[in-house]
Image: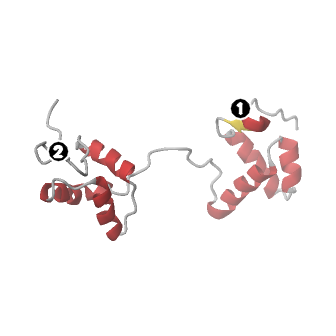
Amino acid sequence: MNYEAPMRRFYIGIHGRRFYVHAYPQELRDRVIDAWLRDEPVTDIACRLEVSRSWAHKVIRRFQEDGNRCSAQMGGHRRSRVADMQQEISEWIRAVPNLTLAQMCERLAMQGVQLTPPALYQQLKKWGFRYKKKLFTLPNKAALTFRKHVGS
């Protein structure tokens, strides 16, 4: 069987290491699994197909665990830990308009949700809350509180 290794796109990072931009082709995954099913040693498979031994082990382990020959999803949307708490957090802000990010994070921590103030701020921005609260404001100045953004 005449197998030619596929062209791989990669860039060279620090210390000369190669970082691959795309997942290996499905055909290569199938070849690794088929060779392993024929009882070939993983080291020989990796050497012959010009892939790393650890990658070949990962492909085989994934196949053994759930019978999946495909690559795992790379990247994607990460859901916020407080995505389902919009109503509750909005009520906090309505009840205490001068609530700071740190205080909201403390309340969330009491409910078992660990979140940093910058992450909470990003979620509040997505929900339409536009102004950060300053912890200390002069009595004669209007305090910047979280307000729901209405229109532009």
Q: Is residue 4 visible?
A: yes
Q: Position of residue 52 (x, y in %)?
A: 80, 47
Marking on residue 23? none
Front: mark 2 or 1: 2
Crowding at dot 1, Cα within 10 Å, few <14 / some 14-19 / many 20+, comes out as: few
The relative height of residue 10 versus residue 70 in the rendered view (above or below) is above
Local secondary structure at mark 1? strand
In this image, 61 relative to 125: left or right?
A: right
Amino acid under label 1? Phe
Picture quadrant of residue 126: top left
Work out whether residue 142 or residue 35 is closer to the camera in this orientation and state it.
Answer: 142
Nearest to N terminus: mark 2 or mark 1: 1
Q: Position of residue 40 (x, y in %)?
A: 87, 55
Between the C-alphas of marks 2 and 1, the distance is 47 Å
Q: Is residue 17 visible?
A: no
Colouring: secondary structure
Work out whether residue 136 or residue 105 is closer to the camera in this orientation and state it.
Answer: 136
Residue lying at 19% horizontally and 59% vertically, measured from the top left: 92
Residue bearing mark 2? 147
Work out whether residue 76 or residue 49 is closer to the camera in this orientation and state it.
Answer: 76
Work out whether residue 56 or residue 135 is closer to the camera in this orientation and state it.
Answer: 135
Residue lying at 37% horizontally and 64% vertically, measured from the top left: 113
Picture quadrant of residue 88: bottom left
Residue lying at 25% horizontally and 47% vertically, measured from the top left: 134
Residue bearing mark 1? 10
Local secondary structure at mark 2? loop
Q: Position of residue 16 (x, y in %)?
A: 78, 35
In this image, 73 relative to 95: left or right?
A: right
The relative height of residue 137 versus residue 16 in the rendered view (above or below) is below
